[in-house]
Amino acid sequence: MTTSSSVLSVRGLRTEFLSSEKTWFPVVNHVDLEVAPGETLAVVGESGCGKSMLAHSVLRLLPKKISRLQGGEVLLGGRDLTTLSDEKMRQVRGNDISMVFQEPMTSLNPLMTVGNQIAESILEHEDISTADATRRSVELMDLVGISEPAVRAHHYPFQLSGGLRQRIVIAIALACKPKVLIADEPTTALDVTIQAQVLRLIDDLKTEIGMGVILITHDLGVVAEWAQRVMIMYAGRKVEEADAETFFQGPAHPYSQALLGSVPRPDAQIDSGDFAPLVEIPGTVPPLNKLGPGCAFADRCAHRTAGCTQAVPDFIEVAPGRGVACINAGDLS
Amino acid sequence: MTDDVLIEARDLTKLHHTPGGVVRAVDGIDLSIRRGETLGLVGESGCGKSTLGRTLIRLHEPDQGSIRYGDRDIAHFSRRELRPLRGELQMVFQDPFASLNPRRSIRQILTEPFSIHGIGNRRERRQIVDELIEKVGLHSDFSERYPHEISGGQRQRIAIARAIALDPSVVVCDEPVSALDVSVQAQIINLMRRLQASSGAAYLFISHDLSVIGYMADRIAVMYLGEIVEDAPKAALWKEPLHPYTQALFSAIAQPDPPSVPRRKRVPVEGDIPSAINPPSGCRFRSRCPFAMPICAERKPELKEPADRPGTHVSCHLVNSA
């Protein structure tokens, strides 16, 4: 992955939150990432690993009083988003970079028709008439696969199903043809058949308008199906990065390996008839404000050695877009 | 039917009266679960799978049909008649935070079933609860904590401990791992299988996650708009689903394999699950079915056992006429 081909580059990003004891602790810790146009990068991890915080940091949507950006840059179209004024940043959001959240009901205004909500975001960024914006919003609803868009445009969110609501959210996100779409668990609240429809839609539009997609998810099946590259996060840090093929052939970090092993795999198991217990990762994700000096995963790691608890392992990049942060990664199969 | 069957429902029907009209949430369903068996129940949200689970163990009273448990039909038992059976018919819910009383310690929560049913004295109950906590993989020190002081996975272990307290013979597990992280999900799934292996309880395991169902279940029943459209032994259903809805559902599974590994051929379904108040005439799936024929609108298909697939039942004109 070379920088020149990236549409979004994040370098050394560090975001801190204020604890209840009034001390600052990192929730995103020295994270680098690159996304190319037409590419989907999956950011994977369990709850509390910092993946949503990473997205909110890039979009600068963090709560001001209790969080701060403490280093790093976010380069989009030659500009460093971390240095923009709030006003300038507002123009970037929804225009150059958009976000789709998990729960479509809470990200839509319940008192406004969905057509007006799409038109509103077009009017915010483009100098066109209301009539044109309304026409465009119907076109967008058609684009995201909503039947009878002219009728549905007059509906309120509560009148639509979860799948349709998420399509509306996507239509709003795509209204100004962004260069980058950040989708934070976009299908977690949806049923499987609808999930496939929504992910197919994002994938088609990605190719069509050449945007880069950051897909934040905990679902490795979804990653394997829809992402070209994978980044695994744990306790605020990037612990592994690889192209999807390499990753699913055999991840290098013990956490990635355990994560993959803990997913039920009925296909293989039904063939072999062997329903052995799933791989368990003992314990839980540690609270980010109580991390020790070593690798944050060490407590739960089956391959822990003495060195693991002494210092946080560096992220070693063996090739562009391929790396791991584990001192024992070399010894692991 | 053999004596192994622990619970059996016939023509089970449960209506919900809503402002918009009557929803046939569970509509004439037959099912049975044997000792030590896990029946997986899948379907999209709103298909009635939770209502079916709750009606089966009489958290709801059915509007029609029978529930044979032991040698009795409990479908219309009064609250009083049901009370002695409550410990035997248990449930684990999706959200352990909502299902555990936040103002009671773990010990109080877990002692309650024993005091209600008058089992043991104070000292004996203390010991039983300690053993119970250890049985679900926690240290008995946890007993003095409150639900908000422990993690989601630990809360679900406590909810499971409460469900198994009185050694139930039937446990309805309603999305028990859906709210948990993958790594914790594996812990809970392993725990539930281990407990079942030693107790021989029958599980009705409800989930929208087909991989979890494929791992946990012995048989799988697929539900659509209040009806079971296919039920079959797991391997048969997994390898060769017959109903177009089952095909669509199982072809949408995303498996964490390298992208170069060939995938299942996608069977597309259009649109969303229709309104349960006005379901389509005839076959309820026909409005989304890629193979719908004129007869599908006219006549409701019956759940039948295909000659070449013993143990499988499917309700589809296309399959049944073939």
Image (tube, coloured by chain):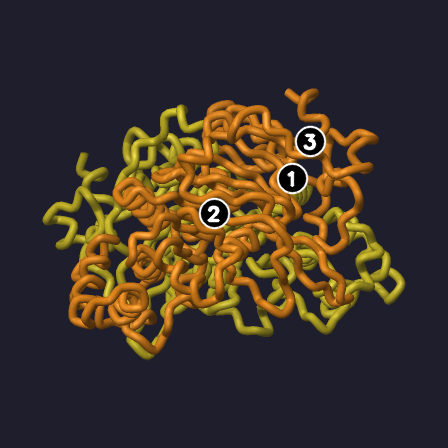
Query: Image quadrant of residue B235?
Result: top left
Q: Which chain: yellow?
A: B
Co-location on one chain, circles 1 and 3: no
The part of the image, by quadrant, that contains residue B232 is top left
Q: Considering the numbered disc 3 on the image, is that residue within a helix, a strand or a loop?
A: loop
Task: State the residue at coordinates (18%, 58%).
Answer: A139
Answer few, some or many: residues within 10 Å of disc 2's Cα (few below 14, many 20 plus, some between 14 and 19). some
Q: Are marks 3 and 2 in contact (CB under 8 Å)?
A: no
Q: Amino acid at mark 1?
A: Ala
Q: Secondary structure beneath disc 1? A: helix
Residue A11 coordinates in the image, percent (x, y): 56, 43
Judged by depth in the image, the label closer to the viewer, 1 or 2, is 2
The residue drawn where x is 35% and y is 46% is A199
Q: Amino acid at mark 2?
A: Leu
Please state which of the two labelled residues, at mark 3 or mark 2, is closer to the viewer: 2
The residues tagged by marks 1 and 3 sit, at their Cα atoms, a distance apart of: 38 Å
Instruction: Establish if B230 lies above or below B74.
Output: above
- Going by the picture, which residue comes out furthest to the left? B294
Q: Quadrant of the C terminus of chain A?
A: top right
Q: Which residue is mark 1?
A: B197
Q: Which chain is orange?
A: A
**Residue placed most toward the observer, A228 or A95:** A95
- Mark 1 or mark 3, which is nearer to you? 3
Q: Earlier in the sequence, mark 3 or mark 2?
A: 2
Q: Which residue is mark 3?
A: A326
Residue placed under numbered mark 2 in the picture = A75
Q: Chain letter of disc 1?
A: B
Kind of element beneath mark 2: strand
Q: Chain of mark 2?
A: A
CA gap, disc 3 and disc 2: 28 Å
Q: Which residue is rendered at x = 54% and y = 42% of the image?
A: B37
Mark 3 belongs to which subunit? A
